[in-house]
Image (cartoon, rainbow, N blue to C red):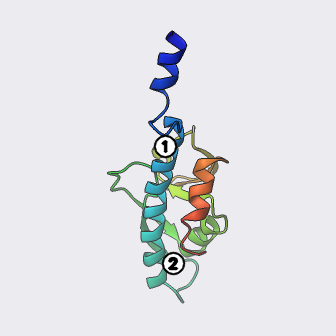
Amino acid sequence: MAARALLSATTTASHTPLVTEREKRMAQNEAASRELNEEIEAAYQGEPPSDRLDIVCECALVMCERTIDITMAEYLLVRADLRQFAVVPEHFIGDIERIVYENDRFAVVAKREGTPADVARDENPRG
């Protein structure tokens, strides 16, 4: 009986694990930030790679209002992998992503395989 209660507490009505729904929601939040940053990056097209731009933090937090100072070259390196996002270092969430690179201004994180990576690839504005 206790096992059944535990099972029902960790699944939704459609029998999908809540962790998967949480991961999907978080990945969608990140994808929305990435889409906004793509518009910012488009406004800087043709500028030297060393030029800096301010992008929004691409973390999973719904109400994040932090910005990241990043060069065009750094931004393009982040976008080279569909699973990667630029976040302020303290917004790293270890159960859905891993740190690829970090400096004093931002961290580049890659979504872990499974739902987070699937959503990152599916909702990539670059196709």
Q: Secondary structure at mark 1?
A: helix
Which disc is residue 21 wearing?
Answer: 1
Residue 12 lies in quadrant: top left
Q: Quadrant of the C terminus?
A: bottom right
Q: What amino acid does circle 2 point to?
A: Asp
In this rendering, the answer to whether 108 lies above or below 3 is below
The residue sitting at 47% across, 17% down in the picture is 5
What distance separates the C-alpha of mark 1 from that of mark 2?
Answer: 38 Å
Name the foreground residue: 1 vs 30: 1
Count all numbered tags in the image, as a single digit: 2
Q: Residue at x 56, y 84 (%)?
A: 48
Q: Residues within 10 Å of mark 1 (few under 14, many from 20)?
A: some
Q: Is residue 17 left or right of residue 43?
A: right
**Residue 77: x and y, percent?**
64, 68
Percent of width and height locating residue 86:
53, 58
- Under mark 1, the amino acid is Glu
- Checking the image for residue 51, the label placed there is 2
84 relative to 48, above or below:
above
Q: Identify which residue, 70 or 82, lies in the foreground.
A: 82
Q: Earlier in the sequence, mark 1 or mark 2?
A: 1
Labels 1, 2: front one: 1
Residue 53: x and y, percent? 45, 73
Seen from the viewer's position, the closer of residues 40 and 32 is 32
* Residue at 46% from the left image edge and 48% from the top image edge: 26
**Residue toward you, 89 or 62:** 62
